[in-house]
Image (spheres, coloured by chain):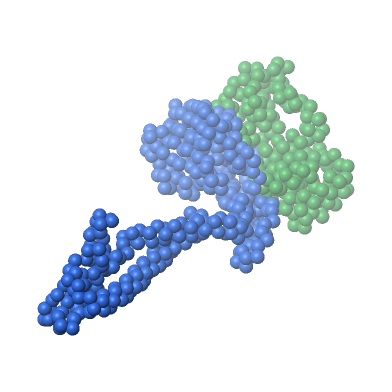
Chain colours: A green, B blue
Amino acid sequence: MKILVVEDETDLLEAITQSLGKEKFLVEQAIDFDEALDKLVSYEYDCILLDIGLPNGSGLDLLKKLKKGDRKNSVIIISAKNSLDDKLAGLDLGADDYLVKPFHLAELNARVRSVLRRKEFNGQEVLSLNNLKVDFSGRIAYVNEQELTLNRKEFDILTFFVVNKNRLVNKTSLAEHVWGDQIDEADNFEFIYSQIKNLRKKLKEHHAQIEIQAVYGLGYKLIEI
Amino acid sequence: MKLINYTLLYTSIALLFIIGVWAAIFYVNMLDEIYDSIDDGLDNSKLLIIQKAQSDTSLLYKNQFGESNYSICPVSEETAIATYDEYKDTLLYMKNEEDYEPVRLLTTIFSTAGNKFYELKIISSMVEEDDLVEDLFYSVLCLYMILIASVLFVNNIVLRKIWKPFYKLIDFLQLYRLGKSSSAIPMGNTSVKEFQLLNETVIELLERNLEAYNSQKQFIENASHELQTPLAISINKLELLTEQNDVPEEQLQTIGHVIQSLERLTRLNKSLLLLSKIENRQFAQEEMVSFNATIKRTIEDFLDIAEFKNVDLVYSEDGELVTYMNKDLAEIVVSNLIKNAIVHNVKGGIVEIAVHEKFFSVINTGSLKALSTEKLFSRFYKESSEKGTTGLGLSIVKAILDQYNGCISYTFSDKHIMSIRFD
């Protein structure tokens, strides 16, 4: 999978590249409008992360050019502007998702996976991790072909961990991903713990070969065992 | 009070005064004229009677008024010399009226050829002053009423027509929201110079405001961009750092704290941006929003936290609260209030949300002390040392309600009660 990251802040560009690199994506960089345009004309990408505010042009213009051609690539806009107008404009122009800075790398990862899944597999992807299978379209998880009964939030938590496997998942990013932005600052996200506890219990009961480890003070990590 | 009624009020007061003064002067002048003409008549009668008395001495013994209007009685010379012509008002018994009525009395002295002195009294019936006053009063009152009625008529027909462009402008301004795809200002075709000027001034003012609004919006967005990007870099770099395998646990914890602080900073930045956006009325998209539905949805979102905090969420409704406002802002109002009610609660506590037709209230258990109502809605005010809260939640709620003619009130009676009302 090939991804182009268009972002004018080199530090952020570097961090995103590094993070996506860990996921075995082939990541290329563009730091301004012209470079991005060059690369988009010359190469095919599966997914493009597009910053709106670029030094010599708007990411939205780039998006327009991109959508004129018959390319099948997914586009995720990453912008510091959390304004509805921009969001609607971006999505109207054919972007698949819109992520507001600052975001967590785990969230970015989940969004990239999600748009790729929709494009490549029509959402029919089933992801396997040892004896765990996750059917994203059916929203069902299996352990050893046996269905794991999960409620909506437990499923969301599990999938967030699965797409970020072996990586540290910050508890804020987990809370915002599963419960939404509104949940912010509510009690330091301690309530997540009880949800994780239930999920762990269910995984254990079914002898899943994965484990959700707590990293004190930071969050959690899903590892294969 | 409406402008038209103001004009009416002041015109009627002024008219009352003017007509009152005019009536008084008119009355005095008229009375003066009446006296003058009566006295002239008496004077004339005097001359005729004296002339007649010189030739007909029988008249000299008529010492009663009787059927005629004069009496004559002899007086001594000394009295005669000391007496001058005198006109005065007095009362005389009138047979027809069966009462004493005012009359004008002329007392004078004359002498006959025999050097005898006589006193002559002549009376003339007088205008009845109280009747006159009464008549005058009613006439004036009638005049006053007619004048007021005509003022009212003129106001309603003419002024209403003249002021039409003014009211049109007011209607337009009342509905005007900065930044909303503004309809053109109605240039009510008026020939009144002041209204033309007013229209032009308002247009100019609005254009200047729009310019300022746009540049402020630009500034806020730029400020947001400038702050969000370094925050994104810091958080993401630290996240990458925590994923390196060789970081000792102690340092991981420290990094965790730094990330938490940065996240708090992010929330603070977002809240401040939200607040300025609300105050700049940048949430122009409005629709009919049902609070019942919004609240039910929000409760759903908060069930997990409530369960963790061991707080009961109870919802009740006895009417539908529907308001025309921005949907996202309505959600922010509801979620901020419910979040506060859950977070600032006690274990085993309760949050009751009751929706009525005109208002809804969020009632929660919590500290047993009433909160300071003055500071409650001010920015960055925190009652508790709650970690991670921005102290902006209620300011945001208040700012939103201010935009939509809503109000929030806080009362305390064992429980904390927040009531949100829309007028």
Q: Relative to B8, is B78 on the left or the right?
A: left
Q: Nearer the viewer, residue B246 or B259?
A: B259
Q: Quadrant of residue A97?
A: top right
Q: Where does the C terminus of chain A fall, quadrant-wise?
A: top right
Q: Nearer the viewer, residue B343 or B413?
A: B413
Q: Nearer the viewer, residue B397 or B129?
A: B129
Query: Which residue corresponds to the image point at 62% horizontal and 55% vertical from the top-left?
Result: B168
Residue B348 visible at all: yes
Q: Position of residue B290 (x, y in %)?
A: 60, 35
Query: Which residue corresponds to the image point at 63% horizontal and 47% vertical from the top-left?
Result: B283
Query: Which residue corresponds to the image point at 50% horizontal and 40% vertical from the top-left?
Result: B421
Q: Position of residue B184 (x, y in %)?
A: 69, 56
Q: Position of residue B356 (x, y in %)?
A: 51, 32
Q: Relative to A87, is B407 on the left or the right?
A: left
Q: Relative to B383, is B404 on the left or the right?
A: right
Q: Quadrant of residue B206?
A: bottom right
> Above or below — where is A175 with respect to A9?
above
> Above or below — where is B32 with respect to B144?
below
> Above or below — where is B158 with respect to B80?
above
Residue B197 visible at all: no
Query: Which residue corresponds to the image point at 61% horizontal and 33% vertical from the top-left?
Result: A179
Q: Where does the N terminus of chain A fall, quadrant-wise?
A: top right
Q: Position of residue B170 (x, y in %)?
A: 59, 55
Q: How many marks?
A: 0
